[in-house]
Structures are given as C-alpha cells and as structure tokens.
Amino acid sequence: MNFDDQIRRYFGTSNLEEVAPAAFEAGIEHMLVDLGLTKDAGERFALWALLHTLGASPDLDAVFEDPQEREAARNFMDLMQDL
C-alpha cells in the first residue's frame, strides 16, 4: 500500500488539506486501532510511520516489542528530522 492509498483509506482523500479537523481526528483514531490490531510487522511499521509523520504516533516501546523494529523506527525518525 502506498502513501496516497493509506491517506485515502483513513481520510477519504489524498489531499490532507481537504480534511476537516473532526475527520482528521477520526482518521487518526482509525489508524491507531488498526495499529493495535495488526500482527504484520511491515504493516505495523507503515502505520506507525504515517502516524509519526502526522504527529500522532504512540511511543516506540508501546508499538515495537522487537529491538530491531524499534531501531528501524528510530532510524526513520532521524531521517524524517533531517528533511
């Protein structure tokens, strides 16, 4: 699933500027629920990364039990900070 597909899935549009504040919060909540339910490591990372990009990601320790997954998330955070 690419970025635009994820945005459309959770917010109903690929343009976040069109999303009303209440719909944005509902989309974030939906993503958090899906994050808590998914067992797939790649899907969990993708959801967490999108939540991080949107400023709504939960703490790494709450999401990633595996130390390598936490390190990958830290690397992602570092890369995003450098943009």
Image (cartoon, grey):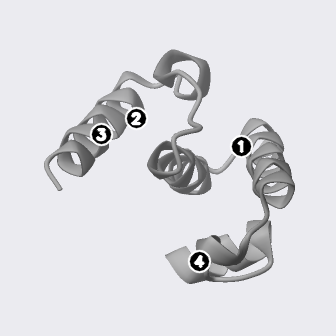
Q: Amino acid at mark 1?
A: Leu
- Please tell me whether mark 2 sits on a helix, a strand or a loop: helix
Q: Determine whether, in the image, residue 20 is placed left or right of residue 59.
A: right
Q: Residue placed at 86% from the left, 53% from the top?
A: 22
Q: Looking at the image, do the residues carrying marks 2 and 3 touch, with CB atoms under 8 Å apart?
A: no
The local crowd at label 4, few if under 14, some if 14 to 19, many if 20 or more residues have their Cα within 10 Å, is few
Q: Nearer the viewer, mark 2 or mark 3?
A: 3
Q: CA distance from mark 2 to mark 1?
A: 14 Å
Chain-order first, disc 4 or disc 1: 4
| Amino acid at pointer 4 | Met
User: Horizontal placement of 29 versus 3: left or right?
Assistant: right
Residue plotted at (56% across, 35% down): 57
Residue sitting at x 53%, y 55%: 50
Residue 77: numbered disc: 3
The residue sitting at 84% across, 59% down in the picture is: 23
Of badges 4 and 3, nearer the viewer stands 3
Which residue is under mark 4? 1
Q: Is residue 2 visible?
A: no
Nearest the eye: 56 or 3: 56
Residue 60 point in image, percent of width and height:
48, 24
* Amino acid type of the residue tagged 2 in the rendering: Glu
Looking at marks 2 and 1 on the same chain, the residue that comes earlier in the sequence is marked by: 1
Residue at mark 1: 35
- Which residue position is annotated with label 2? 69
The crowd level at tag 1 (other Cα within 10 Å; few <14, some 14-19, many 20+) is many
Visible in this render: residue 74? Answer: yes
The answer to whether the residues at label 2 and label 1 have Cβ atoms under 8 Å apart is no
Q: In the current view of this chain or complex, which residue is farthest to the top? A: 61
Which mark, residue 26? none
Helix, strand or loop status at disc 3:
helix
- Residue 31 location (% of width, % of height): 74, 50
